[in-house]
Image (tube, coloured by chain):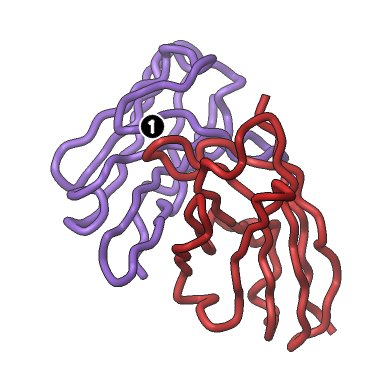
Chain colours: A purple, B red
Amino acid sequence: QSVLTQPPSASGTPGQRVTISCSGSNSNIGSNTVNWYQQLPGTAPKLLIYSNKQRPSGVPDRFSGSKSGTSASLAISGLQSEDEGDYYCAAWDGSLNGFYVFGTGTKVTVL
Amino acid sequence: EVQLLESGGGLVQPGGSLRLSCAASGFTFSSYAMSWVRQAPGEGLEWVSAISDSGGRTYYADSVKGRFTISRDNSKNTLYLQMNGLRAEDTAVYYCAKSESSTSCYSWGQGTLVTVSS
């Protein structure tokens, strides 16, 4: 089963904008919506963006998502120290019997 | 408030079995699809399995197909993962997750650690 490809790391200074890419295929991102998860050190993952660009209640508007074709992006504006952690994209893949696929993960470091 | 509480993790020998449970509260359990996701030490997230709201449809990752079985008891608001033929590579924290509308893994539990070792 395939995975979604993300850069292993991204970094920025406080206040900067950081963007994370997520590359997939026609069977996953190309056909279904993309979700993004944040996992802070020592904690369970938390949904950050769903349906490509929607934010759950309580998620700051500093976080935004977009999708185009078989790729998606997460942008963090006004980077803060508490944003340091791991970020994963995910999408349903309609091939075979269907499965949910996560990205390889990106570690965000606030310099 | 959605609450998901996993239990049943522990140390098991290779080839052994374990059943994980996820007790759900704060929502109408029988109306939502549910999933299991795992994370090996120092690694990324791996989707394991999902089940529809009624339990009539199940989905599995290739890595666990034929060894793991997902099920649910809507009368007890509980999700299960029966794991047989465990291997060292199954060692991970296992998370229970609730879907919302068309979004898989919308809410997450805190996880339970499974260690497969002799």
Which residue is painted at 22% across and 35% down in the image? A67
Find residue B76 and report its horizontal and vertical position in percent. Answer: 74, 50
**Disc 1 marks which residue?**
A50
Image x and y of residue A76, in percent: 40, 22
Q: Is residue B47 visible?
A: no
- Side (left or right) of B92 relative to A51: right
Instruction: Specify the quadrant that holds the N terminus of chain A.
Output: bottom left
Residue A90 point in image, percent of width and height: 39, 47
Q: Is residue A56 above or below residue B106?
A: above
Quarter-of-image position of residue B27: top right
Number of numbered discs: 1
Query: Which residue extends farthest bottom?
Result: B15
User: Label 1: chain?
Assistant: A
Q: Residue at x 55, y 50 (%)?
A: B34
Residue A16, x across and y down, in percent: 41, 15
Viewer-closest of B27 and A66: B27
The residue lying toward the viewer, choosing from B105 and B29, is B29
